[in-house]
Image: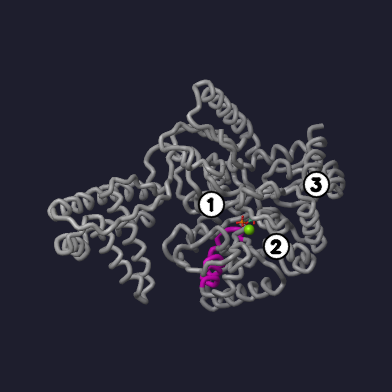
């Protein structure tokens, strides 16, 4: 049994698909039989084209024609006479083996494109390298382990997965995943919960212990992975899977119910999304709004910055999809564990404390303004609330609001309609902002507490590092006192306050947040009904009393014990 961190609920049983990180070295080798190498090269082109045709067709049906177009471009590259001619002559004249001829020719083309001023051509360099990788994988008989190309049902096992790897997973094929590194609030874990894919992270060594094709069970609630289990164990977990399924079904009666405590305190339970396709899950799970749209996923899905029009369409789709319910859209929060392949940021010692989110947007107003224009234009189609991430003080907030005003007046001069009821809020995820939340509250319409980062920064515990995850607790007394301060300061100014970090859906933390008077809980869609059920079973007055006791308890363990003793009574 391999132990890890329970990252996304559910049991998955299936065959492992191990993503290896071994880079194959292709060395210069001189050959005699050039005809054979040329033949290998042409066969590889044929196979690559067939693979790409199949991927293109499946991408078209899953993600639409637009997104699939990239594979059409790859097919065209494989038909380019200049490229084919250059590889052939490198085999004939330099007597290179096929894979080495492909490698050197592709690199020559890619560097040429890289050195051009034109952004479009620079992007093509990444594409041609992709095509080259595919060709030498085929020539060398190496299985392609790109997540987007998985075509059998499996459990992914990897050292690490980026958030965009997770976002690309096809739920019908990927039954679950296991990683060596990461924590519960790393973005690949958050995405797993959004997609409702069971996951265990931070196992330390799963990707070296588990072999391709091994039978694997993952328990996303218990945080354990079993490798090649016997029939009895498989039977036991199948039962568990059924029970979980039954339990989830039993929650469906709450889908259209209010989120209200048993003594009548009403709160709002909303969903967190990463793009338009997640709206359906929020609605299916009875979400009363979207409390956090992490727009960076729109950017991460692409090979260059999304245009204003692309963003406008995505925001409009979400706003219309939510049918007038409130939608909090957060402006770009890139940085930390979320990177853009096309935006080069120099290596940083502490990326979570570095050039990211609002800092980057205020520095790159071109990027920021494009997003704000798209957001403001989309506001005419629903109930939009705009939120800035990583605000550390009043200056950043004022500057960001100034940019919004500039963009608004530009749109007005173009006679473009925008809503006049857009609320502007900020994330409270940096301790300095929490401490001065009395002053910040005067200048916003709402707060949303980003506990994922607030815990990380308050306790000085990297949210991605499994070695220190024992310190990462939402019930840390220092964190709880800060949250209470923020809620009280917001209410004093008559502003509403939510939590959109993972703590909002944490069944151990919800009683305390309710007791503190939190107005909105925003979480992964899969947690909404469980949270509503729990809130319905609690008395607000009792939770208020419990919270004042808890705020004077010195350790997370004592706090948890006290909460459990009260709510199980
Ligand atoms: C947070 O920090 O709690 C949050 C919701 O933002 P993210 O997880 O995207 O950093
Ligand atoms: Mg955050």
Q: Which residue is mark 1?
A: 321
Tell me how many marks there are.
3
Q: On residue 233, which mark appears?
A: none
Q: On residue 430, which mark appears?
A: 2
The residue under the point 62% across, 75% down is 405
The residue under the point 60% across, 64% down is 350
**Residue 211 visible to an observer of this rendering:** yes
In the rendered image, residue 253, in percent from the top left (x then y), is placed at 64, 34
As drawn, is 62 to the left or to the right of 134? right
Magenta part of the protein: which range?
A: 367-384
Crowd band around label 1 with a 10 angstrom C-alpha radius: few (<14), some (14–19), many (20+): some
As drawn, is 409 to the left or to the right of 266? left
> Contact, CB < 8 Å: mark 2 with mark 3?
no
Q: Earlier in the sequence, mark 1 or mark 2?
A: 1
Of residue 568 and residue 402, the one placed in the foreground of this image is 568
Location of residue 69 (image quadrant): bottom left
Location of residue 95 with respect to 266 vertically, above or below: below
Label 1 residue SS: helix
> Contact, CB < 8 Å: mark 1 with mark 3?
no
- Report the Cα–Cα distance between label 1 and label 3: 43 Å
């Amino acid at each position: 049994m391999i132990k890890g961190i329970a990252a996304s609920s559910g049991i998955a049983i299936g065959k492992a698909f191990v993503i290896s990180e071994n880079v194959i070295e292709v060395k210069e080798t001189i050959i005699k039989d050039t005809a054979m190498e040329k033949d290998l090269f042409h066969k590889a082109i044929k196979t690559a084209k067939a693979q790409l045709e199949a991927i293109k067709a499946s991408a078209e049906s899953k993600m639409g024609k637009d997104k699939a177009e990239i594979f059409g471009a790859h097919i065209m590259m494989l038909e380019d006479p200049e490229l084919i001619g250059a590889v052939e002559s490198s085999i004939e004249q330099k007597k290179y083996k096929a894979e080495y001829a492909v490698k050197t020719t592709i690199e020559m083309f890619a560097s040429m494109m890289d050195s051009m001023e034109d952004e479009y051509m620079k992007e093509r360099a990444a594409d041609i390298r992709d095509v080259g990788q595919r060709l030498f994988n085929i020539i060398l008989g190496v299985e392609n382990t790109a997540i987007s190309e998985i075509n059998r049902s499996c459990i992914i096992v990897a050292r690490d997965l980026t958030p965009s790897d997770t976002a690309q997973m096809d739920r019908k094929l990927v039954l679950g995943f296991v990683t060596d590194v990461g924590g519960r609030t790393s973005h690949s874990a958050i995405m797993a919960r959004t997609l409702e894919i069971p996951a265990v992270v931070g196992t330390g060594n799963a990707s070296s212990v588990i072999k391709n094709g091994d039978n694997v069970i993952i328990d996303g609630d218990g945080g354990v992975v079993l490798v090649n289990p016997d029939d009895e164990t498989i039977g036991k977990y199948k039962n568990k899977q059924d029970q979980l399924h039954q339990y989830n079904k039993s929650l469906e009666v709450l889908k259209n119910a209010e989120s209200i405590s048993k003594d009548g305190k009403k709160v709002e339970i909303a969903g967190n999304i990463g793009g338009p396709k997640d709206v359906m899950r929020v609605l299916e799970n009875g979400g009363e709004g979207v409390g956090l749209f992490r727009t960076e996923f729109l950017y991460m899905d692409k090979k260059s910055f999304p245009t204003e029009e692309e963003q406008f369409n995505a925001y409009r789709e979400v706003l219309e999809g939510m049918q007038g319910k409130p939608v909090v859209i957060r402006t770009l929060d890139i940085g930390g564990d979320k990177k853009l392949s096309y935006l080069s940021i120099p290596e940083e010692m502490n990326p979570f404390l570095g050039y990211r989110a609002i800092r980057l947007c205020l520095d790159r107003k071109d990027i920021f303004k494009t997003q704000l224009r798209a957001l403001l234009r989309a506001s005419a189609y629903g109930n939009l609330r705009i939120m800035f991430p990583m605000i550390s003080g009043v200056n950043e907030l004022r500057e960001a609001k100034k940019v919004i005003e500039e963009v608004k007046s530009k749109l007005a001069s173009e006679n473009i309609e925008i809503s006049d009821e857009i609320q502007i809020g900020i994330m409270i995820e940096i301790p300095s902002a929490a401490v001065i939340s009395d002053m910040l509250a005067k200048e916003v319409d709402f707060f949303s507490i980003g506990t994922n980062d607030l815990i990380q920064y308050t306790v000085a515990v990297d949210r991605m590092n499994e070695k220190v995850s024992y310190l990462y607790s939402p019930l840390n007394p220092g964190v709880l006192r800060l949250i209470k301060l923020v809620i009280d300061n917001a209410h004093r100014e008559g502003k509403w306050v939510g939590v959109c970090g993972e703590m909002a859906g944490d069944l151990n933390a919800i009683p305390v947040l309710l007791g503190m008077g939190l107005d909105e809980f925003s979480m992964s869609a899969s947690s909404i009904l469980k949270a509503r059920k729990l809130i319905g079973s609690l008395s607000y007055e009792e939770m208020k009393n419990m919270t004042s006791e808890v705020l004077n308890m010195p350790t997370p363990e004592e706090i948890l014990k006290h909460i459990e003793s009260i709510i199980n009574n």
